[in-house]
Amino acid sequence: MSTPAAPDIPKLPASTRRERSTTLRRARESLIFGGLVLCAAFSVMVTTAIVYILLSESLHFFTEFEEVSLWGYLTGLEWNPLLGADKQFGMWPLVTGTLMVTAIAAAIALPIGLITAVYLSEYAPARVRAVLKPVLEVLAGIPTVVYGFFALAVITPALRSGSEALTGDKIFDYFNSTSAGIAVGILCLPTVTSLSEDALRAVPRSLREGAYGLGATKFDVSVKVVVPAALSGVIAAFLLAIARAIGETMIVALAAGGMARLATDPTEGSQTMTAYMVQIFLGDAPHGSVEYYSSYAIGATLFVITLLLTLAGNYILKKFREEYE
Amino acid sequence: MIGVSSIKKAVSVPAAKRNRKNAMFLYVCLGFTSVSVLCLAVLLLSVVLNGTKHLFDFQITVLPHSANLVESRFDASTRQVVLGYSEERVRTVRIESDRDLAGATTEPDGGDLFLVFPNGDRERIATSDRLVSAELDPQARSVRLTYQVQNVETVGIPGDGSLEGASLRETEDGRVVFHYPDGSEQVVASRGNAVSRLGLLGDPSLGSVGTFIGGAPSVDPRKAGFQSPLVGTIWLLCVCAIAAVPIGIGTAVYLEEFKPTGRIGLILHRIVATNIRNLAGVPSVVYGLIGLTVFSRMFGLLGTPLDYQSFDEYHLSDGSLVVGITTDIQSDVYTLEGPFIGEARLERTSYAQISRFPEHDEEIRVTGTVEFTDDYEFKIDSEQLGSFILSPFDMISGEMLDEDPFPARPFEATFRLEGQARFVVETVRNGRVFVPRDMVGDTKQDIDKLRIRDHIFELKDGRRVSGKIPQMSDGTITVRQDLLSEPVTFHKDDIATRPNGRLAYATKNMITFLDEDHPLHIRLPMGPSVLAGGLTLMLVILPVVIIATQESLRAVPDSLRQGSLALGASKWQMVRTMTLPSAIPGIMTGCILAMSRAIGEAAPILIIGGVTFVTFTPDNLMSGFAAMPLQIYDWLGQPDIEFQRVAASGIIVLMTVLLLFNAVAVIIRQKLQKPLN
């Protein structure tokens, strides 16, 4: 600890000294407190607005239009909102599209992120760590359209020419879930790394030293002591990263294509929930049309999924935080 | 999970095996870590490789102001434009001798310039090589010499396509224009100096950095500029910062400094704290929906925002003016190649569905009817493409038979066919209008196509006219409901006073509703305006600002608080004089980083209706806007692959701005942050 750089001895504001009337002072205090409470209430209002708007507009969607039913929405396997006569509103094509991209992203971000975190917290010399951490922060700060560009300009051509070299056939469509998934995975990597690294570093030294004392190698300590000890934090990091992957918009709108179909093949394009919303609002959906309201239903679905994941992540972080010492 | 038993088990494995595993794991770690770093490297590299090409490809050569172009030619073998120019340089030489200069003259002789006195004496002054004139000034005892200097500059033409048939043209204002074989132009040289070069910023015919940053968007990738998105983003950020920073800091101060003691207060406090953590996890696209409903539409309670949009104007070379609103709708452009007998072959140059990206050799067959009405004229008709416009503007050697700038007419069109003919076929979705390049007169507003939204006009006689294509010339507005219906024409003065009492009026040569508003004027509902966009972004970054502020407030040691309270300060006085000032570097850093997140957000403003093809920069809070990430997204979605490079250039600009923000944040953190504990 450095010696405290003695802050200037607080000079009471001139107004305090002059102020005789405590009533006035109290009135002003409560006025300011009221203002602060209003600020705080604003964030609660935002949440209320989110819930209210998504609910009411989805309700409108489900009740006002003949072709839509809640049951059909929850179980339907076809999503054709734009085709004139035969409009279909079953959420599963969009949900599976989202899940496909998220699964690919998770398959990339979770292992690489966790192992990078283990390396940073257990193995890396201080100097390497001092370089790597900011580098990962740079990754986190890059706007998502840039990742979209990366997917289109680098990942997709690489996948296509790579598969052509291996099998003689361009297996991947130009717009495919894999490319988008990889880009989303890279995007989520810093989230996983920095959150799980925080968790790993919070594990007290005594646990590590105890294991070393028993003759464990660094590998044993990292994998069998530190990671299990920080498991709640690591899982929370995973959940938050997955929530981010599900809510990611621009990458999938650019690289995954716009065909809403049941996503079974990662080499094909698929449409995610977020990409659908972009498609609708880019196409200037007229207010009051069924596709306009359908995006609120999709938004509500998306909100519920990500909220559940975020809640679970925060809950795990709080509840299962292993308190040592 | 962790227990002595698992360690004991691990330790019981032979040491050699364990050490091997240990060493291997380190390699795995290193490998995975380098994968993350590699990703970043490849990402940045791909942006730089793609983007710099467009940014720096085409440097315009600036010739000196006094330059006199002697020769300009294009050498196709080296792909270089050679510019030979002469330039006058003036030198003033003092006369060293102190003799009387009355009647003295100057005279060149044998490569030198001599001063000749009336009595025949000669004195050398300077070299006469390339000398044009010499003026003797007896009063100042000096000679003003003007030389003519020859110079050669070369300019490379980028790309690798054939340049057969390219030519050069010199304009009257001293520019050299390169004509590509396809008819497009590029300025390769211009007279001027460093200062006037700045003035060239934004000229769409220039292809260098300044042009990109200062230019308007265009459908031609060579001319696409980034000015309106850049300025739009700055407007958005200002609105966003003004809204988010006070509310964010206020909330954080409430959470950290005014922890209530009562039971209800405590519950409220906990609700707010939990709520903010969850808000941070809400996808930004959901905030877009909220922004759309709350700010842009205002729940539809206050009318529709459509009435308030400002128009873009496009001057066409036939003198007409087109007024409309730009939107972004995907387009199909097909090139039809003759001869048109029986079946027409469509060469796909562009794709409507982003989900479809056929290989380049794929043929699209249109089995419409092609009917020759006489030897040279024919009719084309196709059901497969739906309604589409045939425009004769791309005919290679045909005459333009139709002067209407909007080829919006029913399916059939009659053209003259001479040899090979090409036609642009456009499917019109949601009302888009094609204005051909050679019809656009004003290069500043060089727009190749217009995309126009539905529009509603209320007229004084009670009629309500709505339609997709507002067209205006001489104050007359033509609106078409769709391509097949009869157009409705009315005079701009017939537009009625609007329900809210404000008059929709026409300015000099452009219809504008309420255009001359004060920059801070606010109308409700906000529509897809800068204000709505900035407030929506505020929702997105509010949790970030709050959490960052909370963290820096938490870092302020309690001793400071207790000290000021002990001196008799009230809670607010303590916050104002002690806590906030101590935490301000951290708060500023957090706010700047939150802003840099706002810069990169595209989804929410896309939802509220930020448009991507905007030629104007916002001038008041109610203006429509473009934003950098949105424009990049639009470019990436363009079918022309050349736009990927343009997008990469845009990304470079975007990342440079982000880098600046981060640099400021780092500097603040390092300069201002004092150890507090």
Image (tube, rainbow, N blue to C red):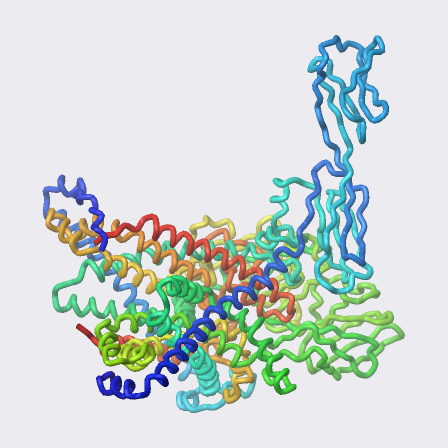
Point 78% across, 71% down: residue:
B422
Q: Is residue B140 above or below residue A40?
A: above
Q: Nearer the viewer, residue B650 or A238?
A: A238
Task: Tell me which corner region of the image, top left, top right, bottom left or bottom right, holds residue B416.
Answer: bottom right
Instruction: Using residue B25 as the reference point, say whether residue B551 is left or right of it.
Output: left
Point 84% across, 77% down: residue:
B339
| Residue A99 pos. (x, y %) | 44, 83
Point 65% across, 75% down: residue:
B351
The reply to whether residue B462 is visible in this rendering is: no
Q: Nearer the viewer, residue B169 or B559?
A: B559
| Residue A94 pos. (x, y %) | 47, 83
| Residue A50 pos. (x, y %) | 35, 72
Instruction: Using residue A101 as the reference point, say whether residue B638 is left or right of it.
Output: right
Instruction: Using residue B210 as the reference point, say whether residue A19 is left or right of it.
Output: left
Q: Quadrant of the N terminus of chain B?
A: bottom left
Point 62% across, 87% down: residue:
A167
- The residue at the far right in this view is B375
The reply to whether residue B259 is visible in this rendering is: yes
